[in-house]
Image (cartoon, coloured by chain):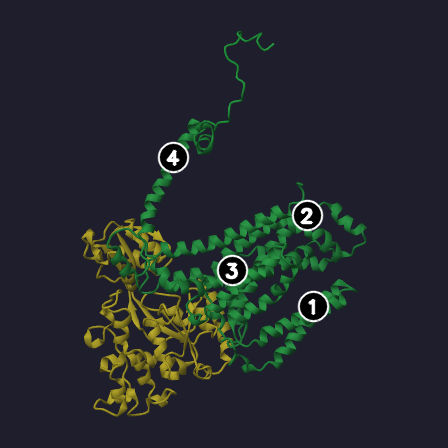
Chain colours: A green, B yellow
Amino acid sequence: MSDTHAKSVAFVRETTIPQSAPPMAASGPVLWMRTNLFATWSNTLLTIAALYVLYLVLTATMPWMLNGVWNTESLRACREVLDGTSGACFSVLTERWNQLLFGFTYPSELYWRPGLAFALLFVAAAPVLFFDLPRKLLFFTAIYPFLAYWLIWGGSVLYPLLALAGVVVGYLVYSKLVARNFAAGFFGGIAAAVAFIWIGGLLIPETASDNAMLEAVPSRDLGGFMLNMMLGVTCVSLSVPIGIALALGRQSDLPIVKMICVVFIEFIRGVPLITLLFVASVMLAYFFPPESTVDLFLRVVIMITMFSSAYIAEVIRGGLAALPKGQYEAGDSLGLDYPQKMRLIVLPQALKISIPGIVNIAVGLFKDTTLVSVISLFDIIGMIRGPILASTDWAGVYWELFMFAGALFFIVCYGISQYSQWLERRLATDHR
Amino acid sequence: MKKTVFLGALTVAGLAAGAAAAGTLDDVKARGKLNCGVTTGLVGFAAPDANGVWEGFDVGVCRAVAAAVLGDATAVEFVPTTGKTRFTALASGEIDMLARNTTWTFSRDTDLKFDFVGVNYYDGQGFMVPKALGVTSAKDLNGATVCIQTGTTTELNLADFFRKNNMEYEPVPIETNAEGQQQYLAGACDTYTTDASGLASTRAAFENPTEHVILPEIISKEPLGPLVRHGDNEWGDIARWTLNALIAAEELGITSANVAELGAAAGGSPEVNRILGTEGNLGEMIGLDAQWAMRAIAAGGNYGELFEKNIGEKTPIGLARGLNAQWTDGGILYTPPFR
């Protein structure tokens, strides 16, 4: 049989050709470039134009960056070192880094305290941000605000301990009363905590801070990027719960609660933040006797928190409105009361929808904290525009300082946005 | 005008609040610290150094008052104020005195209810031009483009000056000093105008300061001085005569180096003796002890020493004494006698 066609075909391949690599032009970087950069004529032109612009930018900036001077005492000394060549005077950063990060009056031997508080912030925030972590870590999150306050401001340990004890008392009262009625538990808990802290405050002697383990640092000595971080973290973490309460209040059936929330939100949203800051720093001073003003930091925190909570309330209201009515009705038909329905069914879904909006507000708020430089608080921008640019040594340095500030803000804001994207992917339950 | 009325109303409210308190001198003594308002930073006049210690010409006045009142030149809480917050901070009692290169004007003295206690720097508006332009007098600036900060008195002064001299100019409006510096260096304008001290400190920050000159004409009066609240004259006297003591000390040759020696025992000059408290009872009259002026001078030196150390010709800012020289040297510093 096999001989039948032996002469009819010249050649018969009896084995398959071994696999060979695809041609150069159809794989790897070449393919990628052909499809992405040089697919069509116009595409090619745009690529070349973009590369040329990139080249221009880099040739203009890279020599300046790479030729940077890192270790001179003043701008004049730096320019002597550069000797007419183009170069950055990064030495302003190495000489004044501590002022940029901590402000100019925070005692330099105490820098470890805000540094430690910053490091612990990650530990405290981790269980809140990444809910796969063991829930026991939340215990540390609960004590973190008091610990951070003690580390940064110093003074007697009694004050943060008292505040912590007050919160514990409030929680105990809440858990006792909540079984009967949520509102009774909620307001009873707050009242108990306030009363406890007020009575306890009377018992702590005035001189408690004099020989404290950590030296007390007054608020006006805080500054630099530390101040931006503190304002950002405090105000965001305070304004999310307040914003939720306001959003729920705005949808409430109780007319007075609803009216208060609407007026608050609309008023705050209608006023620029800088106006509120001026009120905090200038106007409030008139309403207190000269010696008993409320701490400026606290005033600013209150104003920024009010501002951002009004915005967050509107974002969350959008989330609440986006939920189908059936979800609310499902809660009702299960026989849940209002707090249970909100806590177990409505809010988890509404908040998930609101994440991008909340993160948007948080990022904007964090950058808005630089506005406090206008009311002569020395945050990082205040430090640059005030003391550093006004010093005889460094008057005239702009790019290096503002680039540094921009880099710090970019790192934080980019981190926040990456986290929120991770969170959205993690919570995506609808595409399974 | 509306703004002035508003500020005035605020001030009255602040005064009403402050009036209930005791005298400022007692407050300062009880507190053990002088709250002194300064700028958030102005080269040579007030800025914290790398260690966070405030220094500068205005700072020197604060330290002298603290030394006179409290005996400690470091017992000062420096409260940085911006141009917007400075007056309310003083009116509300947050600060005891303001030493923040503030121009003494009629409305600030009367309508805003403050008392200027003297002048520690006579400033005025000047012009800076590149040397290459070949201009030696402001009168040669006909047809020039001028970088000018909008909304300031300098803008009005400039218009007046050019109209008076029948000259034309083209304004290039800018917002801040930093912007002015960049525009001027980029060649957007032929000349940059602002207060002469500001021009000097701006020029000091240039890469090649020697390529620019500040023209000799000064076209406005800007007397800068410390101020206190209206209505507490005892405190105002202390601030005024501390400043006067610094100026008189230079005239009489009392320096930080020899003040201890001169103050140890009565010497040949009666006025020196009266200032340093070895003769007479001037300290008692002002409500302080006999050595008040001695401590004020020892704190940072006399007026001339403060000037040389912070803004004088040996510093990068390099301001000449000019009007700010003693009357005996052709300037207009002239203190009333200590008697």
Q: Earlier in the sequence, mark 2 or mark 3?
A: 3
Observer-side mark, 1 or 3, equals 1
Chain to which the residue tagged by mark 1 belongs:
A
| Helix, strand or loop at mark 4 | helix
Q: On the same chain: label 4 and label 1?
A: yes
Observer-side mark, 1 or 2, equals 1
Q: Give the CA separation, mark 4 to mark 1.
A: 64 Å
Crowdedness near tag 3: few (<14), some (14–19) or many (≥20) residues, C-alpha within 10 Å:
few
What residue sits right under mark 1 in the picture? A171
What residue sits right under mark 3 in the picture? A275
Q: To which quarter of the image does residue A340 belong? A: bottom right
- Number of numbered markers: 4
Q: Give the CA separation, mark 1 to mark 2.
A: 31 Å
Question: Residue B132, position in %: x, y?
Answer: 19, 52
Q: Which mark is residue B277?
A: none
Amino acid type, mark 3: Thr
Q: Earlier in the sequence, mark 1 or mark 2?
A: 1
Chain to which the residue tagged by mark 2 belongs:
A
